[in-house]
Image (tube, helix red, strand yellow):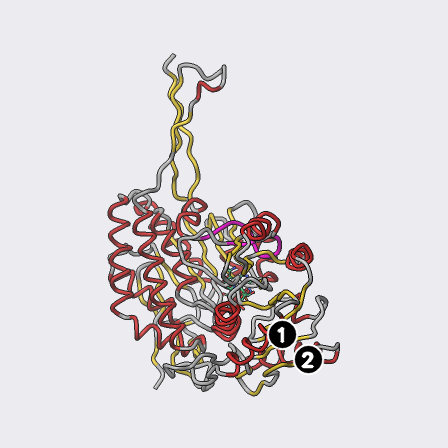
């Protein structure tokens, strides 16, 4: 039985002329249908959000905070239902789906708290010799309509990372979720409506990125584009958006360094989760493990034993570790990359096989930096282990990437840890952890091709406001 969802635009639940099936990514069968938006509905959503902004921008902070708090409770009350949707639409193993729902509730909680702390500053105007007898301060004001475009791999929490700070700051939102995973966003719309969010503040449009997404990006009434997704689409968005704020959260080929003084057992256990959670489809999935030559054999043995113990299968099974990839064509793509690496000299230590929607957790050794599995974002359950000789050399290898989201360093040597913090060209350095660590109030985002700007509630909120300077002349 497929469930027919309606979409939520301008405070109304709607069917449209065209419905799209949402596929269970493990079985390949439809489990839901959702209405597709056309151009007219896109314009209606933007107009509705623009109108709603006129009142929502004036809503007191305590009221915005209360709505967000109510959403926290409602998300928690529907935890298992939403996790089951995420496991089906994204193919995410149950334990990671539950984790995503719990994180999303926390994301809203942080926004509920930060909504009360949004403030400006006074400026010591008389620091200028032309500024005597003047009092100056700035306030932060919401922008208006924010267009949010999100990827498939965290269909709830990456939506939450855009919607919650937008509400906290008094903006209105038009969301275009990934076409593969639209249902979580519609459930969030139900929750926000029940939480008391006024009509028009949150709108969901489901449709192809090149049509609905593009229409949002170029529309003059969308005052900010907040995008999470691939570098290719991010590049197009930044070129098309024109004069408006743009935040881009893009990809990475994340690296983690293992020094010989690390606790190898602990490090290997974390690396396995970091490489294979959500079948490697995480922007900070561990892809390159650089291990000091002094301990590479020992680390590799421990790591491979743990990889062999992973349970691959139906994401709805409570003990599943690794589910399917988002599409069978992604399985073919990554299989091609692995076969190409093998032809270039890489060795498959474990895995290396794919069929249908599933790709086995795969560990490669004897790789080179030029292979696609190393220098491009794999976004699949494939990780490579590389030996290095000196700390300076490995920092250069990590920085050799065109990406720069996060990196991890296992060492108990404080000087090496601080050298890594200083020298790595990334948005976050995780000491004694892998590149994959994130909780939702940290500033999060990448350097180089990994993006523009930072999310993490407070930081997203700052970028969803304009500063207005106020000067009072007491001369
Ligand atoms: P994607 O293909 O770039 O899609 C992301 C979103 O953009 C989808 O909603 C998509 O719509 C839409 N889109 C596609 N073409 C568009 C266009 N021309 N104009 C406007 N919107 C357009 O990415 P994905 O495959 O869903 O996600 C994987 C990527 O996201 C990876 O590169 C990953 O690293 C990155 N990611 C980054 C972060 C981070 O925080 N840095 C977090 C998670 C994921 P359709 O679905 O309809 O195509």
Residue that label 1 marks: 297
In the picture, the quarter occupied by the C terminus is top left
The residue tagged with tag 1: helix, strand or loop? helix
Q: Nearer the viewer, residue 60 or 266?
A: 266
State the predominant SS element of the stretch in magenta. Answer: loop
Residue 347: image tag: 2
Q: Nearer the viewer, residue 374 or 41?
A: 374
Give residue 295's quadrant in the image. bottom right
- Position of 436 compared to 423: left or right? left
The residue depicted at 66 percent of the width and 78 percent of the height is 338
Residue 387: x percent and y percent? Answer: 67, 68
The residue tagged with tag 2: helix, strand or loop? strand
- Position of 69 compared to 383: left or right? left
Residue 465: x percent and y percent? Answer: 42, 43
Asked if residue 446 is among those painted magenta in the image, a careful observer would answer: yes
Position of 365 relative to 215 (above/below): below
């Amino acid at each position: 039985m497929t469930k027919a969802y309606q979409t939520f635009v301008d405070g109304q639940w709607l069917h449209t002329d065209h419905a799209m099936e949402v596929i269970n990514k493990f079985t390949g069968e439809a489990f839901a249908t959702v209405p597709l938006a056309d151009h007219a509905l896109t314009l209606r959503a933007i107009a509705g959000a623009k109108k709603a902004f006129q009142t929502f921008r004036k809503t007191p902070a305590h009221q915005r905070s209360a709505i967000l708090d109510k959403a926290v409770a409602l998300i928690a009350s529907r935890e298992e239902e939403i996790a089951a949707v995420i496991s089906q639409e994204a193919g995410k193993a149950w334990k990671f789906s539950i984790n995503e729902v719990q994180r999303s509730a926390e994301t809203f909680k942080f926004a509920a708290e930060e909504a009360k702390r949004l403030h400006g500053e006074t400026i010591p105007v008389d620091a200028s010799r032309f500024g005597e007898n003047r009092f100056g301060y700035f306030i932060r004001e919401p922008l208006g309509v924010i267009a949010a475009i999100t990827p498939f791999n965290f269909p709830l929490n990456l939506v939450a990372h855009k919607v919650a700070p937008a509400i906290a700051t008094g903006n209105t939102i038009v969301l275009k979720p990934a076409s593969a995973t639209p249902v979580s966003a519609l459930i969030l719309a139900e929750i926000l409506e029940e939480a008391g969010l006024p009509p028009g503040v949150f709108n969901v449009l489901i449709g192809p990125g090149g049509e609905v997404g593009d229409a949002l990006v170029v529309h003059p009434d969308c005052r900010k584009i907040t995008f999470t997704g691939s570098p290719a689409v991010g590049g197009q968005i930044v070129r098309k958006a024109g004069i408006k704020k743009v935040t881009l959260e893009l990809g990475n080929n994340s690296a983690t360094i293992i020094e010989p003084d690390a606790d190898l057992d602990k490090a290997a256990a974390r690396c396995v989760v970091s490489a294979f959670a959500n079948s490697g489809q995480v922007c900070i999935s561990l892809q390159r493990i650089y291990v000091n030559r002094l301990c590479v054999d020992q680390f590799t043995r421990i790591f491979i034993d743990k990889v062999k113990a992973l349970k691959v299968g139906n994401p709805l099974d409570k003990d599943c570790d690794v589910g399917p990839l988002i599409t069978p064509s992604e399985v073919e793509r990554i299989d091609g990359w692995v076969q190409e690496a093998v032809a270039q000299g890489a060795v498959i230590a474990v895995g290396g096989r794919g069929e249908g929607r599933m790709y086995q957790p795969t560990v490669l050794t004897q790789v080179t930096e030029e292979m696609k599995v190393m220098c491009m974002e794999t976004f699949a359950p494939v990780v490579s282990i590389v030996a290095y000789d000196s700390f300076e050399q490995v920092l250069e290898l990590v920085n050799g990437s065109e990406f720069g989201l996060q990196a991890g360093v296992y060492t108990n040597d404080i000087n090496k840890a601080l050298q890594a913090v200083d020298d790595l060209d990334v948005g976050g350095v995780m000491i004694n952890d892998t590149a994959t660590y994130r909780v939702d109030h940290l500033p999060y985002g990448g350097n180089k091709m990994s993006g523009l700007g930072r999310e993490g509630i407070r930081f997203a909120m700052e970028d969803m406001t304009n500063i207005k300077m106020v000067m009072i002349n007491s001369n």
